[in-house]
Image: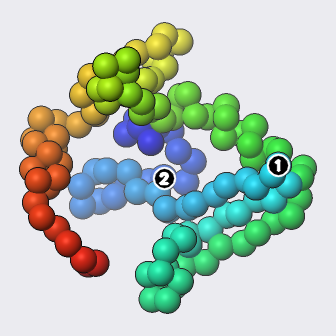
Amino acid sequence: MRADADVSGSELTAASGAKATLHTKAFVVDSKELFIGSFNFDPRSANINTELGVIIRSPELAGEFTTAVEKALAAQTFEVFLNEKGKLRWRAIEDGEEVIYKKEPQTTWWQRFKAGFMRILPIRGQL
């Protein structure tokens, strides 16, 4: 999700000035069923957290949802991909033009440094 995305239902948090949104998961199965919820498909959500979700069996609603998501993706997300040399890149559409970033967009060098440092730590087990 892009930091500058216009997400309905988001609001500025008083503490940091950042936008906060619900962490909804949603997907369509076989163009017939729509899942919407906060549930993560992992043991922690199944056994510890109070997460939930609903399955809606409606090809019409699944189709409307798919259309809305596809329409919003280009303007509100980055596409992450590997270029021909196997390097990580981010693609965006800005002012109707495709833009390719070599560094993670909308991040500072400090944020990228911390993320890179965390990758070398030998973290094992579950939190």
The answer to whether the residues at label 2 and label 1 have Cβ atoms under 8 Å apart is no
Give the mark, 2 or 1, whose residue is nearer the N terminus.
2
Q: Is residue 83 above or below residue 120?
A: above
Query: Could you say whether the residue bearing mark 1 is in a helix, strand or loop?
Result: loop
Q: Amino acid at mark 2?
A: Ser
| Quadrant of res 91 | top left
Q: How is the image coloured?
A: rainbow
Left/right of residue 97 with respect to residue 27 in the rendered view: left
Q: Is residue 111 above or below residue 36?
A: above
Residue at position x 24%, y 55% from top? 16
Q: Which mark is residue 125?
A: none
Q: Residue 85 appears at what percent x and percent y?
A: 31, 19
Depth check, front residue: 19 or 35: 35
Query: Could you say whether the residue bearing mark 2 is in a helix, strand or loop?
Result: loop
Q: Is residue 100 above or below residue 14?
A: above
> Pointer 1: what residue?
31
Q: Residue 6 appears at what percent x and percent y?
A: 50, 38
Do we see residue 74 in this rendering? yes
Whole-number angstrom distance, CA of label 2 to CA of label 1 = 28 Å
Do we see residue 61 in this rendering? no
Q: Amino acid at mark 1?
A: Ser
Q: Residue 125 appears at what percent x and percent y?
A: 24, 77
List the single residue furthest toward the bottom. 47
Left/right of residue 67 with respect to residue 53 in the rendered view: right
Residue at position x 28%, y 33% from top? 104
Left/right of residue 2 with respect to residue 112 in the rendered view: right
Residue at position x 51%, y 34% from top? 76
List the single residue furthest toward the front. 85
| Quadrant of res 127 | bottom left
Q: Which mark is residue 10?
A: 2
State which mark lies toward you, 2 or 1: 1
